Amino acid sequence: MDIVQSQLIYTILELWGGVFCIVGAICLFATRKLTVKGIELITTIMLLTAVLLFSDVFAWRFDRGTENLKVLFYFADFLVLALPYAVYSMAIVYLAGFVSFRIGKPKKRMVKAANALLVINLGILVISCFAGLYHWYDENGGYHIGKYINLHFALCILCVLIMAIFVFRNRKAFYIWERIILFAIFIMLIISYITEATNLFTLSPSNFAACVAMIIILIMHSIECAMVSARQREELDQAKRQMYLKQIQPHFVLNSLTSIKQACDDNDPQTAGWLVEKFADFLKESLSSISNTECISITKEMQTVRNFMDIIDDRFDGDVKAVYDLQEVDFVVPPFSVQMLVENAVKHGIRKKPDGKGTVWIKTRHEGADYVVEVLDDGVGFDPEAISPGDESQIGLKNVETRLRLMCGGKLEIESMSGKSTRVIMRIPKKQEARRAVSYS
């Protein structure tokens, strides 16, 4: 195979690689709401790799004697040398976010070193454009390799080594198969730069190696998204099971039936019928929620809350009051989320006061980009630092937080003062991003 045929095959491979990176970036961007955060970094890396490959093709295959295209040739040559530095710098930032998600925040020395090396490399490259360190042009616009081009390859190898050291130092964050694949990529890139620096090939194997690395990384990312999705489904199913068991507690059923029986004994059929209706509605919602995988309207959720509080009001002879201030009703929440917060306020706040009397305020509103549900009680409060992880009240709050995060992309905020009050706030994004809970950034 002669040089012309080799160059043609190489050009086709680079074009294919560039198209693949663009298509992969588009697919990642289109599914960003259904996958892990940090996807923007991978998308940007793939787009930069595509620009790198297309720039190399443009610099290789077009006639440099075309006067009108000279500036574009100069710019393409600059991108071919500059983009690897940017890609490697962004890659280590992504790896740092990945490690942070898996085992906690890593030391940032390697990330800072990579960013510092990026600035140094770009500075040397700019100087090279005027001093001809890496390449230079003759009076006809012809491209010539500079005496110090191997410095460029050495700096690229240094960038790869920094990533390899970072992965090795944080190897506990990666599965064994991930480590093997990542180090295989690093070795492949280093070999490609060495062969290019020693002129073993007339082409640029490093760019092709970068394309192969992108394909492998995209596959790894797809596997990671599938694993995260499976973990989220398992976590959500567990939270729903806990919610179901919590709602159908024997003591709540027994107390409700006792209230109904008391009304019958008092010859008050109207109250008994009313309690039966409220209790039946509550049970119906509890049973249906176990199979519900979607959020429900706040209006429907508040009906469940009212049924619950009506039973509580009768059970405790009006000692526990509920005040509603619903300024926003056009949004959705996980089923039984607000009800669980209200039940927590009654059971672990108000009823633990000496007189067992108090008020629960349930408010809805919008703040900026979020819908807000606030549950405030004037109960005994608690000290967040003194609560053990297995505390019953914290199990309920954790349940709500998990379902809120996985089903609505929301978050839970808790403010409490021991002996005074507790405020729990649910924040639901107006732009729903369901199941987008994991953050790599």
Image (spheres, rainbow, N blue to C red):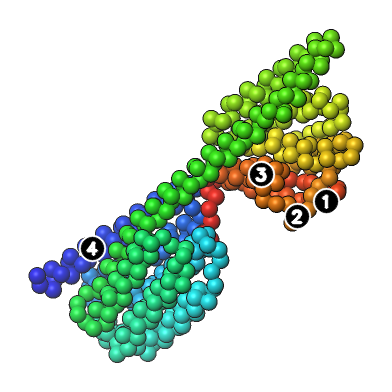
Kindly identify the amino acid type of the residue bearing the numbered disc 3: Ile
| Element under disc 3 | helix
Q: Nearer the viewer, residue 345 or 248?
A: 248
Q: Residue at x 27, y 82 (%)?
A: 197
- Tag 2 residue: 386
- Tag 3 residue: 395
Q: Is residue 242 above or below residue 92?
A: above
In the visual, does 329 lie left or right of 193?
right
Closer mark to the observer between disc 3 and disc 4: 3
What whole-number distance in Å separates the C-alpha atoms at marks 2 and 1? 10 Å
What whole-number distance in Å separates the C-alpha atoms at marks 3 and 4? 55 Å
- Tag 4 residue: 13
Q: Is residue 61 visible?
A: yes
Q: Residue at x 45, y 45 (%)?
A: 230
Kindly identify the amino acid type of the residue bearing the numbered disc 2: Ala
Labels 1 and 3: the sequence-earlier one: 3
Asked if the residues shown at circle 2 and circle 3 are in contact, with their CB atoms under 8 angstroms apart, the answer is no
Q: Nearer the viewer, residue 69 or 400?
A: 400
Quadrant of residue 122 within the rendered picture: bottom left
Q: Residue at x 21, y 82 (%)?
A: 199
In the visual, does 110 lie left or right of 206?
right
Q: Residue at x 29, y 61 (%)?
A: 17
| Element under disc 4 | helix
